[in-house]
Amino acid sequence: MASTEKRKVIEARHLQKTFGDFTAVEDVSFELHGGECLGLLGPNGAGKTSTVRMVYGFSPMTSGSLHIFGKDMRAHWRDIKYGIGVCQQENNLDPDLTVLQNLEVFASYFDIPRKEAARHALELLEFMGLEHRVDSRVTELSGGMMRRVVIARALINRPELLILDEPTTGLDPQSRHQVWDRLELLRSQGLSILLTTHYMDEAARLCDRLIIIDRGKVLVEGPPSSLVKEHVGRDVVEVREPGRELRGLVMELGLRHEDLEHRMIIYGSEEDRLFDRFSSIYCGGNCLLRTATLEDVFLVLTGRELRE
């Protein structure tokens, strides 16, 4: 559906977005190359949605530079929008129209001829596994089906860049996996994807690279597996009600850890031999041995406190 040429689809430099006295995005720079899926992760209010809204031209940047498809967003935003497909957080489909009509009407915004729009809409609905619901009203669909319709609609203009803002929020596991399967196929066909999500398993599965942002700034960037290895290691030991002896050993060995009073989380690489050191002495029924995940990285870098 898109070119596999490895050129810069997005080149963002020092993006800033302010709303009055509030700075939503302070200093964000990144690149997205052709055929790549790049994930933006961060807590609520970190600046993810504000960043992607600048990328697809919904919200003008306060300062910085932004080039999409090699074109300056400030000067060529109309041309750029024709090459972007956007799946927003909300299911903003028209409830008075059928599934097929939602795509056909949206196609008219891109000046796509009616017959071509109808044909391509049917192809997209079949691709998303919705060929049996083309004449259904939106209100008759499940949440998972609605999300697949929104993604199909975002593809109606054959975009070179697909922007997904939390595409599977609120979906059950079956629906999430259906969406993931379709997105993986799109990526394999060369489509460039910019994704925001709160699901760490989604980010690890779909994204070639990740950027974690907080308070409007980039904290880290890299492939999911590299971020896990660099920031938390390979193995994790979680201990409930850790004793003084365990705390002393962790400090003596200089192991990366988080002491949460009634729970201690210890991170280690392969050479630290965490499981060997702790399983026999400290790990009875109050200890969990597991592999490090992207969620560990996220919590270590952005903290565990709730965000409003």
Image (spheres, helix red, strand yellow):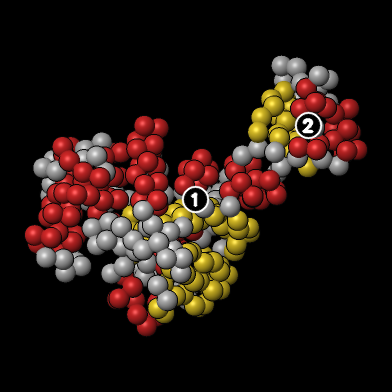
Identify the mark at residue 240; answer none if there is no mark.
Answer: none
Q: Residue furthest front?
A: 5
Neighbourhood count class around disc 2 (C-alpha, 10 Å): few under 14, some 14–19, many 20 upward: some
Q: Position of residue 78 (x, y in %)?
A: 29, 76
The residue pinned by badge 2 equals: 274
Determine whether 143 is above or below 27 in the image. Answer: above
Q: Position of residue 57 (x, y in %)?
A: 36, 70
Determine whether 60 is above or below 191 in the image. Answer: below
Q: In what element is the residue under mark 2?
A: helix
The residue pinned by badge 1 equals: 207
Residue at the spot 41% in from the left edge and 79% down from the top edge: 72
Q: Position of residue 215 (x, y in %)?
A: 58, 60
Q: In what element is the residue under mark 1?
A: loop
Count of numbered circles in the view:
2
Q: Earlier in the sequence, mark 1 or mark 2?
A: 1
Neighbourhood count class around disc 1 (C-alpha, 10 Å): few under 14, some 14–19, many 20 upward: many
Residue at the spot 70% in from the left edge and 44% down from the top edge: 232
Left or right, 61 with reference to 248: left
Q: CA distance from mark 1 to mark 2?
A: 29 Å
Q: Residue furthest bottom?
A: 75
Left or right, 263 with reference to 101: right
Q: Residue furthest left?
A: 115
Considering depth in this image, is 57 or 18 the residue closer to the camera?
57
Determine whether 118 is above or below 7 in the image. Answer: above
Picture quadrant where residue 156 is located: bottom left
Left or right, 212 with reference to 273: left
Looking at numbered disc 1 in the image, what kind of residue is underneath it? Cys
